[in-house]
Image (cartoon, grey):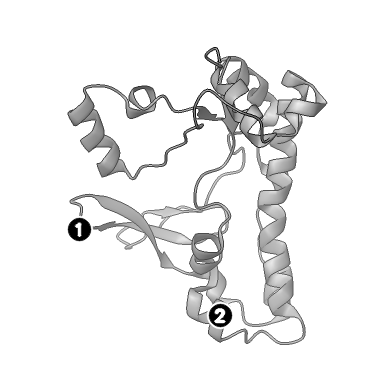
């Protein structure tokens, strides 16, 4: 079989067709990325022949700013606060330290909260990002968005999520539903950019 482009390789794998090799994706914490660059002498994305490239729409709505002197260094779209915590590999990793959503106690709290919206992003730049990665398969998002451990655990904490579904009157399911609308809406809007670039069949992948 002749060598495929990365995009052809991924699409064939999705269609359960033979490929020239297994498609490869990689996610790295900052210290691992730095260690690989030192070891390989170049970007591991190139060294390992990674088949996917990430595209994404920049946020147009500002994020909450941490208070001066607070432990929190960064707030995400949901208002959850993070700080860089040292790890055993010699690096630092953003960990949730202010579980803002854990303080939602009533249905009124849930309904009045400033939830993120898929409309908070500028998707007009996505087609140009795709064009700049010609020959590669593109993806949006990242490894922890939205998985049940990172996405939900950072929201209300795993103990609250699994052991203490305490919000009464359906508010627990309402919280989960509202939290899930943002990544789904964002994914749909991003995929519209893919469709405009590649056409409806391939843009939906």
Residue closer to the observer: 6 or 101: 6
Q: Residue at x 49, y 80 (%)?
A: 159
In this orientation, which residue lies closer to the viewer: 138 or 155?
138
Distance from the alpha carbon under mark 2 to that under mark 1: 28 Å
Q: What SS does tag 1 mark?
A: loop
Whether residue 143 is situated above or below residue 56 in the rendered picture:
below
Question: x, y percentage for residue 19?
Answer: 57, 26
Residue at horizontal 72%, vertical 56%?
181
Mark 2 vs 1: CB contact within 8 A: no
Residue drawn at the location 20% of the way across and 58% of the way down: 88
Quadrant containing the N terminus in the rendered view: top right
Q: Which residue is mark 1?
A: 88
Q: Vertical placement of 161 versus 29: above or below? A: below
Residues packed near mark 2 inside 10 Å, few (<14), some (14 to 19) or many (20 plus): few
Q: Is residue 90 left or right of residue 182?
A: left
Q: What residue is shown with label 2? A: 162
Residue 180: x %, y % from top left = 68, 59
Q: Residue 189: tell me if it is visible.
A: yes
């Amino acid at each position: 079989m002749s060598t495929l482009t990365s995009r052809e390789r991924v699409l064939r794998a999705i269609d359960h067709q033979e490929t020239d090799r297994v498609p490869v994706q990689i996610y790295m914490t900052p210290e691992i990325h730095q260690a690989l660059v030192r070891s390989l002498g170049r970007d591991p994305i190139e060294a390992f022949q990674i088949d996917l490239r990430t595209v994404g729409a920049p946020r147009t709505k500002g994020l909450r700013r941490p208070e001066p002197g607070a432990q929190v260094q960064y707030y995400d779209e949901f208002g959850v606060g993070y700080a860089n915590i040292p790890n055993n590999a010699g690096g630092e990793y953003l960990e949730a330290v202010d579980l803002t959503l854990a303080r939602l106690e009533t249905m009124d709290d849930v309904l009045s909260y400033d939830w993120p919206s898929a409309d908070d992003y500028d998707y007009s730049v996505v087609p140009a990002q795709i064009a700049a990665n010609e020959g590669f398969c593109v993806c949006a998002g990242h490894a922890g968005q939205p998985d049940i451990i990172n996405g939900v655990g950072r929201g209300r904490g795993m103990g609250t999520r699994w052991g203490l579904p305490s919000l009464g009157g359906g508010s627990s399911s309402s919280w989960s539903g509202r939290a899930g609308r943002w990544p789904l809406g964002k994914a749909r809007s991003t995929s519209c950019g893919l469709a405009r670039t590649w056409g409806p069949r391939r843009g939906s992948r």
